[in-house]
Amino acid sequence: MENEYIIVDDLKDFDIRQILDCGQIFRYAKTGENEYTVMSRDKRLKVAQDENKAVIYGDKAFAREFFDLDRDYGKIKKQLEDLPYMSESLEYGGGIRILNNDAWEMIISFIISANNHIPRIKGIIERLCAGLGRDMGGYYAFPTAEAMADKGEDYYFALGAGYRAPYLASTATAIAEGRFDIDAVRSMPTKEAAKYLCTLLGVGPKVADCILLFGYHRTDVFPVDTWIKKVYRDTLGGAATNKQMREKLIALYGNLSGYAQQYLFFGKRDRD
């Protein structure tokens, strides 16, 4: 760390475009040729990267935790490289890191993401923050559960959430009223945590896996979406349900499944 920013001068395990474009976050924008702005909770970070280094501007303690800078991704990739179908994806997307996102923000974000596309997801979340989030001066914090629970589903329909509107209203109310305990998920075994998350309206198995991976850093899950289905078809092949794909992929990658998912997902989507 130097002065008011963090310098990452070893880029083999850090690439800001890859980190932001691998499906784990929606509150970001490219603000220059080699510059991105990223927002999480009530924080805003700016990242400028060239061929030699990345410079992260903003709250340094938050940035260090958010970008998972204390974890050795070189070691993780070394463990993955001899596993099936990984070598090419690791070479292509080796700068990916799994962010330490806020669990509440991920619950709402991935409910919005279901059967949706990135520009529309980002637009809904941006309007949600502008309408209900605290004004931080130039940007808005992600709204609290209490702020969201204060609005009915009509509000979320008006934001463009479509059929997800009642899911947002119901989930915010359940969390604001204490009927769902976000923090309790942290101490639950993964299968129990996934089942508990699925008690929230709008959360199914795939969304629960995304929340566990990106909101709780549970790396023994493997979210299966359109791109992972293509990866599965091209590698393992054969007809399979989402559940069967998920189980077979977890059997292959074990506790590294979440990392494998990100490398495989990015490698497929970014090149197709």
Image: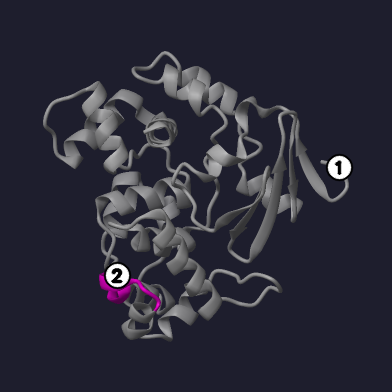
Task: Name which of mark 1 and mark 2 comes first in the sequence.
Answer: 1
Residue at image position (34%, 47%) is 209
Indicate yes or no whether the magenta region holds residue 160: yes
Image quadrant in which the C terminus is located? top left
Q: Which residue is mark 1?
A: 2
Whether residue 193 is visible, yes or no, is no
- Across and down, in percent, residue 99 comes to 55, 45
- Across and down, in percent, residue 96 comes to 54, 34
Q: Amino acid at mark 1?
A: Glu
Q: Residues within 10 Å of mark 2 (few under 14, many from 20)?
A: some
Q: Amino acid at mark 2?
A: Arg
Left/right placement of residue 234 relative to residue 17 reads left
Q: How far is the residue under mark 1 from the one under mark 2? A: 44 Å
Residue at image position (40%, 79%) is 177
Residue ranking furthest to the left: 239
Mark 1 vs mark 2, foreground winner is 2
Q: Which residues fall within the magenta stretch?
A: 159-167
Relative height, residue 252 to residue 229 (above, below): above
Residue ranking furthest to the front: 33
Pick the residue in front: 217 or 18: 18
Q: Element type at marker 1?
A: loop
- Across and down, in percent, residue 57 comes to 76, 51
Q: Residues within 10 Å of mark 1 (few under 14, many from 20)?
A: few
Which secondary structure is most common in the magenta stretch? helix
Q: Element type at marker 2?
A: helix
Which of the 4 quarters of the picture holds residue 184?
bottom left
Residue ranking furthest to the right: 3
Indicate yes or no whether the magenta region holds residue 123: no
Cβ atoms under marks 1 and 2 closer than 8 Å: no
Q: Which residue is mark 2?
A: 164
Residue at image position (48%, 80%) is 146
